[in-house]
Image: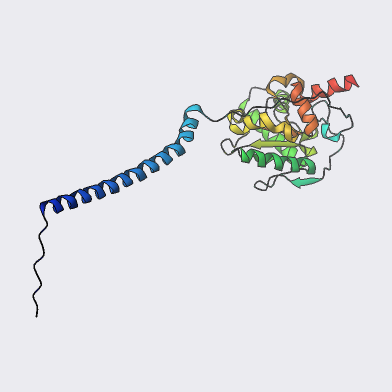
Amino acid sequence: MQKRSPARRMTYREWKIRKCLRLARNWVLFLAACGGAVALMATGILWLLPKAHALVAGPVPFTARTYDSSSYVFDAADDRLVVVNANLALEEEPAPELAVADDATGEQLEAEAASAYRSMAEAAQADGVELNLVTGWQDADARTAAYEARLTAYSAENSRLSAEEAADHTASLQPAASTSEQGTGYCADILSPDCTEKTAAFAETRAYEWLTAYAAEYGFILRWPEDRQSATGMVYAPWHWRYVGVENACAIRESGLALEEFLALERAKS
């Protein structure tokens, strides 16, 4: 059997060349790894920048559009402009055609108002805002129960008041059955996940900010504004919205008036 010849020893020059090649390869691998890490970090920074900016600057405000009401035509016979209040009580129980407006709560509104509410809620959702319709149409029994519950609570909180005084004050917070627009199917009490109670705190939510800016574009107005309490006779309720149709809502929004004032002004023009 023929013996294998011994391996040839590398010369110093060959050994140095191999060492340089290995060093170059290691540097290439190192730089490639660094490049990948830098690219990953850059991607992460680009992803975080808008979020960090949002945290520092806060959420983008919802800005109301300006409405041109110069071509608005008032229709005194428009059923959507019906007013029910302490001075204009219901003469008979309304019988609106109803439709479910909010699948999550099952609340109903008059059919046209329900469709408008759905469109409005979808638009709000697209802007990152969730609207919850907590009270829609109510029959006479439900309206009576709501009034009596509020009267009982108010009387307990203000025991020094007479029964008549308590009733008068309660009526400015929760209308009695015959003076409540909730029976028309046009009123919508709207809250949000971060405010689930009908309190003034709803005015501090993004949902209220969104509604204030855009609700008119879907036919809804704030029914009892804070600065129009003398006209409505009702305490400010940021959750209480009313459907009147897009054209009417935009004109009312632009006027800055409560529904009662707007109708009085338009009728005086006719």
User: Is residue 102 toward the left or the right of residue 6 in the image?
Assistant: right
Instruction: Determine which quarter of the picture holds residue 86.
Output: top right
Q: Quadrant of the N terminus?
A: bottom left
214 horizontally vs 26: left or right: right
Q: Residue at x 42, y 37 (%)?
A: 45
Residue 161 picture quarter: top right
In the rendered view, would you say 207 is above or below 262?
below
Residue, x 47% and y 28% (percent of image)?
Answer: 56
Looking at the image, which is closer to me, 65 or 240? Answer: 65
Q: Is residue 137 visible?
A: no
| Rendering coords of residue 52 (x, y %) | 45, 33
Nearest to the observer: residue 126 or residue 255: 126
List x then y, in percent, for residue 135.
69, 40
Q: In the shown orientation, is residue 188 left or right of residue 209?
A: right
Q: How is the image coloured?
A: rainbow
Q: Quadrant of the C terminus?
A: top right
